[in-house]
Structure formats: structure tokens, C-alpha cells
Image (tube, rainbow, N blue to C red):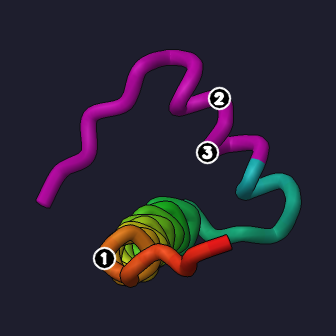
């Protein structure tokens, strides 16, 4: 797989390398973070739906 980056993305990748993150690990971390955030959004949406589906209490 080849990864095409903009100049700004490439600069960010090189900055990560200067901070001790390998050029291979930085994109892998980004993918893992993206997937984790998506899973979190899904769990929040499911929880919100359960709350909306509950019958309302009378005052």
C-alpha cells in the first residue's frame, strides 16, 4: 500500500518522527485512533437511542 500525503500531512509525519514515532507507526496510530473514535460515537448513539426510547416519567 502506498500513502499519498499533502505537504502539510508530510510535515506532520516528519514532526512525529522527530518526536520518536516511526514513519510507519504514525499512520497506524492514526487509523487506530480513527477506528476507536468511530466505535465510541456508535456506543454514544446507541446509548442515546436507549434513553430516547424509555417511557417518560410523569411529574
Position of residue 34 measured from the top left corner of the image (x, y, whole percent): 43, 63
For marks 3 and 1 on the same chain, the one whose residue lies earlier in the sequence: 3
Q: Which quarter of the rendering shows the C terminus?
A: bottom right
Identity of the residue drawn at 65% across and 29% down = 11
- Please give the label number shown on residue 13: 3
Which residue carries the number 1 mark?
53
Q: Specify the quadrant of the image occupied by residue 52.
A: bottom left
Marks 2 and 3 in Cβ contact (< 8 Å): yes
Q: CA distance from mark 3 to mark 1?
A: 44 Å
Q: CA distance from mark 2 to mark 1?
A: 47 Å
Q: Nearer the viewer, mark 3 or mark 1?
A: 1
Position of residue 2 measured from the top left corner of the image (x, y, whole percent): 18, 51
Position of residue 1 measured from the top left corner of the image (x, y, whole percent): 12, 60
At mark 1, the secondary structure is helix
Identity of the residue drawn at 37% across and 30% down = 5
Magenta range is 1-15
For the stretch drawn in magenta, what is the main secondary structure? helix
Q: CA distance from mark 2 to mark 3?
A: 5 Å
Alpha-carbon neighbours of circle 3 within 10 Å: few (<14), some, or many (≥20)?
many
Which residue carries the number 2 mark?
11
Identity of the residue drawn at 50% across and 17% down = 7
**Vertical arrangement, residue 35 with respect to residue 34, above or below:** below
Amino acid at each position: 500500500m502506498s500513502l499519498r500525503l499533502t505537504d502539510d500531512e508530510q510535515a506532520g509525519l516528519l514532526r512525529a518522527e522527530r518526536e520518536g514515532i516511526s514513519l510507519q507507526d504514525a499512520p497506524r496510530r492514526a487509523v487506530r485512533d480513527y477506528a476507536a473514535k468511530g466505535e465510541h460515537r456508535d456506543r454514544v448513539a446507541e446509548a442515546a437511542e436507549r434513553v430516547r426510547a424509555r417511557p417518560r416519567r410523569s411529574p
